[in-house]
Amino acid sequence: MDMENHAMVRAEVLTEALPYIQKFRDDIVVIKFGGSAMENPELTRRTMRDIVLLEATGMKPVVVHGGGKAITARLKELNIETKFINGLRVTCEKTIAVVDDVLHNTTNRQLVDGIREAGGKGCQISGKKMLRAERLVSRDKETGAELDIGFVGKVVAVDVNPILDALKYGFIPVIAPLAMDFYGQVYNINADMAACDIARSLKARKLVFLSDVPGILRDPHDEKSLISSIKTSEVEGLIAEGVLSGGMLPKIRSSVAALEAGTSEVQMIDGRVPHSLLLEIFTDKGIGTEIVEG
């Protein structure tokens, strides 16, 4: 492709993006960044650059991140056992200290640095300052007996003021998914559910999950079985069919709650695809699976 044609293609891309830039100007978009995409430094760098581009076009991105693999690696270094029950990390006193350290001093800091390197203004916000939680009760699937999973919490209140203050001054908030109860105890919070709680409280225009799957698949072994759109009224039927199961259930149900609270749409896309965030927001076709109220 010669230089002139290349320039024309770029101009056409910008033209296609224009109505979406106008549509989402001044709107809050919560982005949950996690999965294997976070383990790839180049993909992380590109994603942070794309998030800076969203902010430059007038949108207000808010980033909520995971950090599971980094936490597991640190626990292994310290010879602390990693155990999961019902998809949730069992979190003892030693583990919560490691989770706190990794999320704040490694993962969160790296993402904020990535935003700054791309020319944006990243802002570290600890969930401990804005998320209030209580201990999450997990139960045995067969007997219903309560299981001890330690300091794992569920969010009961969100103080959105730290986020709104950061957005007001042109910062991109990057939030570590930890919370405190009213007595000062720190809890580990599932990052997907934290993102939903934050989006719901902000009444965000969009909630986007960047993970390591193309979206919701009718057949988990066939990427061609991608479901491009799901209405909230269809969710329970898909659960009954077994299409939605396991760790996807709390994410889906929290997403439905966010939609019912005022978020316009939830999108689940493959963060491993370069510029997937821009493809979803700024193109006619979009990618992944959208969940909408209806």
Image (tube, rainbow, N blue to C red):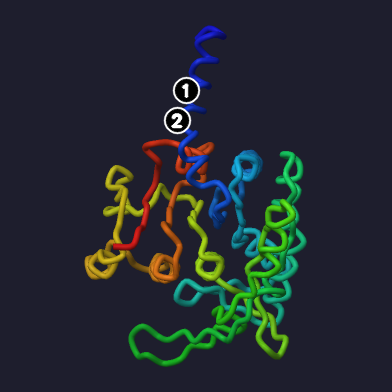
Q: Residue at x 52, y 60 (%)?
A: 204
- Percent of width and height locating residue 171: 72, 53
**Image position of 265 with respect to 157: above or below:** above
Residue 177 coordinates in the image, percent (x, y) = 63, 68
Residue 16 disc label: 2
Dot 1: within a 10 Å radius of its alpha carbon, few (fewer than 14), some, or many (20 or more) residues? few
Q: Measured from the top left, where is residue 202 in percent x and y?
A: 56, 66
Name which quarter of the figure residue 123 lies in: bottom right
- Proximity of marks 1 and 2: CB atoms separated by less than 8 Å: yes
Q: Nearer the viewer, residue 149 or 47?
A: 47
Query: Which residue: 72% across, 51% down?
Result: 170
Q: Amino acid at mark 1?
A: Glu
Q: Determine the secondary structure under disc 1.
A: helix
Q: Residues within 10 Å of mark 2 (few under 14, many from 20)?
A: some
On the rendered image, what quadrant is the C terminus found in? Answer: bottom left
Q: Is residue 277 above or below residue 74?
A: above
What residue type is disc 2 on?
Glu
Residue 40 position, x and y percent, is: 61, 44
Disc 1 versus disc 2: distance between alpha carbons? Answer: 6 Å
Q: What label does residue 54 carry, if any?
A: none
| Relative to 189, 8 lies left or right | left
Where is 259 relative to 28, above or below?
A: below
The reply to whether residue 265 is visible in this rendering is yes
Q: Which residue is mark 1?
A: 12
Identity of the residue drawn at 72% across and 39% down: 118
Q: Residue at x 43, y 86 (%)?
A: 139
Q: Is residue 107 visible?
A: no
